[in-house]
Amino acid sequence: MHIGVFFPGFISDQGGAFTFEQEMLKALVKLASTSSHRFTLFFDASSFCFAKTLTNYDHIEKVILQLQMPAKEERNLWLKIFDKMKRGLKTNSEVVRGISPFQKEINERKIDLIWFPTSVYLPVDDPFIATVWDIQHRSQPWFPEVSKNGLWVSRETYYAKYLRKASFILACNNTARQEISFYYQIPEVRFRLLPHPTPTIEHIPSAEEVKSVLDKYLIKKPYLLYPAQFWAHKNHINLLKAQKILLDEYRMDFQLVLVGSEQGNKLFVQKMVGELGLEESVKLLGFIPKEDLVALYCGAFALSYVTYFGPENLPPLEAFVCKCPVIASRVPGAEEQLGDAAILVNGSKPDEIAQAVRRLEVDPELRNFLIEKGQIRAAQFTSLDYVKGVFSLLDEFELVRRNWGN
């Protein structure tokens, strides 16, 4: 079959979305020649990805789409996604006069099936595979980042429109499949489970390199690391309260290092740091380069990933690679993703978060156990495994797709 793959092009400060997209692109380029299918990759011309330097390979062609995304770099991730989505929906009006630009490319190139490897989809008449990261606007609609300024309606309209029409949906685990199937009345037979792949970390820094990064940011050991954009659902406030317990009740002289780009909640977090008297023990670093973040993983006492959102999350996997013990929220899906490689806590209970940190301090064997289990988990499923899983789905669908022409 001739497969079209659309990459919207996230930028680096969009965190996990950027990492996931880049992992998929690199793995697909690497593995395309091993598949019996032919691939055409579509890129948004306004995107900041390495598509411009990607040359054409056997089985792969590159197409730059002039979709005229409005430049609104100040907007948060989901607003950016819906900028792209709304632009895609606008192209539907062109159908009255003829055909949308994307559909025109699909028809001219005789594409048999489209794969959307991220959660950004464009209107198409042809069969397509949709990828879903989360539908937390349904599970936890009270968070402003999925509800305010019309975002709840946008997300709901968007997913209801595309997921019900998708030939297949890629979900990360059973929790995700059950949620999506329930909320959108989609038969589970149309789902395929592909876990979130462990990100590729090209270089694990030496002890000297880690020290250099710690010195750069004036970080002292021991410290807890929380790389998360400043959204309300990331639960920074309960983590700050846990930090207060560690200092005042357990007398543990720990720093808390918060890394992530501003998404509208950073000033509130800073205000709470002051009210709790944590100015000396909390570092708010903002967005930092990936190589610095890797060094922080390697030097951290533990990752304290206490988000309210699931069903899977990327940073615990990065921590596993870097031999950083993981404390994570017991969100639906966390046990499927992390197994016994992490301490799971109720993120709404600061005392429980603090107790987990205390357990790691008084029990070195537990800490070593988590490091070992994390390394095993990290090796289980990579981006190459993910793309191979998609290839298997393509082979399966080809038996059906060969029954009609373009």
Image (tube, rainbow, N blue to C red):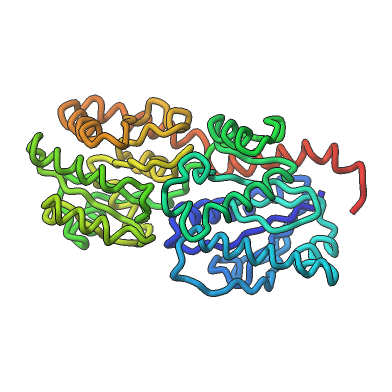
Apparent side of residue 206 relative to residue 402 in the rendered image (left or right): left
Apparent side of residue 402 relative to residue 329 in the rendered image (left or right): right
The foreground one among 89 and 53 is: 89
Relative height, residue 67 to residue 399 (above, below): below
| Residue 213 in sight here | yes
Name which quarter of the figure residue 231 lies in: bottom left
> What residue lies at 26% left-to-right and 55% top-to-bottom?
269
The foreground one among 37 and 70 is: 70
Which percent across, then down, holds residue 313?
44, 42
The foreground one among 20 and 273 is: 273
Q: How many marks?
A: 0
| Residue 58 in sight here | no
Name which quarter of the figure residue 218 lies in: bottom left
Which percent across, then down, holds residue 277?
11, 52
> What residue lies at 19% left-to-right and 26% top-to-bottom?
363
The foreground one among 180 and 404 is: 180
> What residue lies at 70% left-to-right and 42% top-to-bottom?
391
Apparent side of residue 199 relative to residue 325 in the rendered image (left or right): right
> What residue lies at 23% left-to-right and 25% top-to-bottom?
365
Which percent across, then down, holds residue 291?
35, 57
Q: Quadrant of the C terminus?
A: bottom right
Which percent across, then down, holds residue 188?
67, 30
